[in-house]
Amino acid sequence: MTLSREKKFFTSILLFYWLSLLIATHIPVPDWVRVMGVSDKTMHFAAYMVLTILIWLASSFDMKASWKTFRPLLVLAFVLFYGFLDELSQKFFAGRSADLLDLFSDLMGISAGLLLATFISGYHLTMILIAIAPVFLPAIVHAKIIKYDSILETSMYVVVFCMITFAWGQYLNLILRIVPKTFKSICLFVAMPIASLIFVIVYAHLTNKPIGSYAISQPFGAIALIAFTQIMIIRGRRFDKAH
């Protein structure tokens, strides 16, 4: 069986993520993780939701999860069994212990991942992952890995949202075949990145993880700049083809 380019890409991402997750769950919890302000159960939920989505993208990139087949049930059983073994094995590592509630959080994350895969697939599902990824940025600053209200914090937000804006623009143009002609279509190129940024700001406020003033304002400009550049490139290419 020949794997598509997308399946090869997500298989490599999956292997790297899974190895990282395996290591992270079998070493003593670092002090910076303890002060991130994110509950252990939330981390388990998020980790297993992402793991499930990556497994689905690597194995069934262009397919939605149809519950009339065994495929989603097989993924559910496999990832849950892995979660069970992961929890059980932690009893033998210093600073770790097995927790039934952690396994329940894993199950909720797996279910959430498969629920998303039930309604969307392929690049659409990939964009969901990209859109929600920045939600943990405030926790990184809260853990003092990056200094609050610093150039580094601002740079982190700018770089992340530049990447998100670029990915979103490529998705709109190459996958959805949207050409920015009208005001409405142009607005689409900034809609998701801005919505993602606002979501992060609201999350940070609700969880008492303040974001520096520059780190809040500068990404808006970066989003506009990247989107405008992509729009000009797309329209330029279209003009060249027409002539």
Image (cartoon, grey):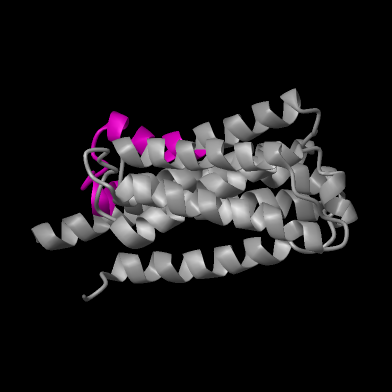
* Residue in front for this viewpoint, 8 or 41: 41
Is residue 175 covered in magenta? yes
Position of residue 8 relative to residue 128, above or below, is below
Q: Give left or right: position of 207 versus 136.
A: right
Position of residue 8 relative to residue 104, above or below, is below
Q: Give left or right: position of 167 versus 241.
A: right
Q: Give left or right: position of 43 versus 224.
A: right
- The residue drawn where x is 60% and y is 51% is 84
* Residue in front for this viewpoint, 25 or 6: 25
- The residue drawn where x is 40% and y is 41% is 114
Q: Residue furthest top?
A: 206
> What are the residue bounds of the magenta stretch?
172-193
Residue 99, quarter of the rendered image: top right
Is residue 145 covered in magenta? no
Say which quadrant the N terminus sits in.
bottom left
Residue 194 pos. (x, y %): 52, 35
Does any portion of residue 112 appear in the rendered image?
yes
Does any portion of residue 231 appear in the rendered image?
no
- Give the number of marks: 0
Residue 132 pos. (x, y %): 54, 41
Say which quadrant the C terminus sits in.
bottom left
* Residue in front for this viewpoint, 58 or 181: 58
Residue 63 pos. (x, y %): 24, 50
Q: Main secondary structure of the magenta part?
A: helix
Q: Give left or right: position of 80 versus 233.
A: right
- The residue drawn where x is 33% and y is 66% is 7
Residue 137 pos. (x, y %): 69, 46
- The residue drawn where x is 48% and y is 47% is 129
* Residue in front for this viewpoint, 85 or 179: 85
